[in-house]
Every structure is written in structure tokens, then in C-alpha cells.
Amino acid sequence: MIKFLPIIFLVFSCSTPKEVVEDNSFSVFYKNDYGGNEKPSHVLIQDNESYIKLIESLKIDETEFSKFLTVDFKKKNVLVLYQGQKNTGGYAIDIESISKVNNTIHVKKKEITPKKGDLVTTALTSPFCIALIPKGNTIIIE
């Protein structure tokens, strides 16, 4: 029985390593403090029709349209991160980093909050950001 122990250990200790790729090919191309969702959430857009609907739903000024890119949805997706409704200004949401593990995109978000004693506007805000990210089968927001 002792002779089989090393073989069993060898079988269980060998596994296929996960391919982790740090992917810095994302770009946040639009941020705003107003116009986001009331609840924290995210939306992954994978086609042009949904992207156009998003842009129309934002109700932004025509001068802002130049910030929106033409997206090749064969190579990239669009990710919208919503921070949710806040009672004051001083909040923001952004992407800190993105990595790809076996065709799963891991997005590390960065939420900014006002520090105690900061002077902020007294207004309801709903911060959000829109980013161009790599394609993947699934997305995980961390």
C-alpha cells in the first residue's frame, strides 16, 4: 500500500496551470456623475445595436458624441459600470485593472468616495463609466 502513495500524490498534484494574462488593452472613454442607474450594477454590451441604445438612453449633449468610439465588436466589448445613486457629489467609479483567465475577463473596479470633511455638492448623483474591454466568454467584476 505504501508503494502506491507516491503515484497517487503525483496524479493529484499535476494539473493544468491556468493561463493568467494581464490585459491593459482596456480604455475608459466616458465618465459622468449624473445619468447612471439608481442601483450599483454593470452592463456588458456585445453588439452595435445595444451600444446605440445605451448612447441614446444617456441623454447627453450632442457635443459629447465625439467621445463615443466606433467599436469593432468582433474584437472588443463595451462595459458600463454603475456606482448607484449617492446623496452627494465626490463619488466616482473607474476600472483599476483587467486580467484574462482562460477566456474569462476579470475586471477590478475602483470606487472613489469623498473623505470625511471634504466639501462636496449637495445633489443626488449616479456615477458611471463606460469602457472598451477585450472579448471574453464571461466577465467577473471584483
Image: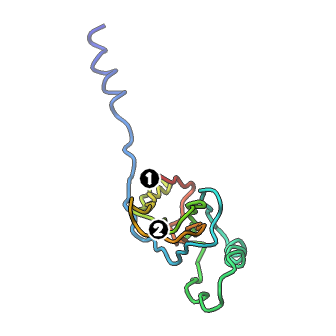
Residue shown at 69% from the left, 80% from the top: 59
Quadrant in the picture for the N terminus: top left
Q: Is residue 126 left or right of residue 116?
A: right
Element on which disc 2 rests:
loop
Residue indicated by mark 2: 90
Residue shown at 64% from the left, 72% from the top: 35
Please name the amino acid that badge 1 sits on: Val
Element on which disc 1 rests:
strand
Image-quadrant location for residue 33: bottom right
Where's residue 60, x and y in %? 65, 82
Judge depth for marks 1 and 2 and give the one in front: 2
Residue shown at 63% from the left, 56% from the top: 39
| C-alpha gap between disc 1 and disc 2 | 33 Å
Image-quadrant location for residue 14: top left
Q: Is residue 14 left or right of residue 38?
A: left
Q: Alpha-carbon neighbours of circle 1 within 10 Å: few (<14), some, or many (≥20)? A: few
Where's residue 40, x and y in %? 59, 56
Where's residue 127, x and y in %? 55, 67
Question: Tag on residue 5?
Answer: none
Residue indicated by mark 1: 101
Say if 17 sits above or below 117 in the image.
above
Where's residue 130, x and y in %? 55, 71
Q: How many marks?
A: 2
Please name the amino acid that badge 2 sits on: Gly
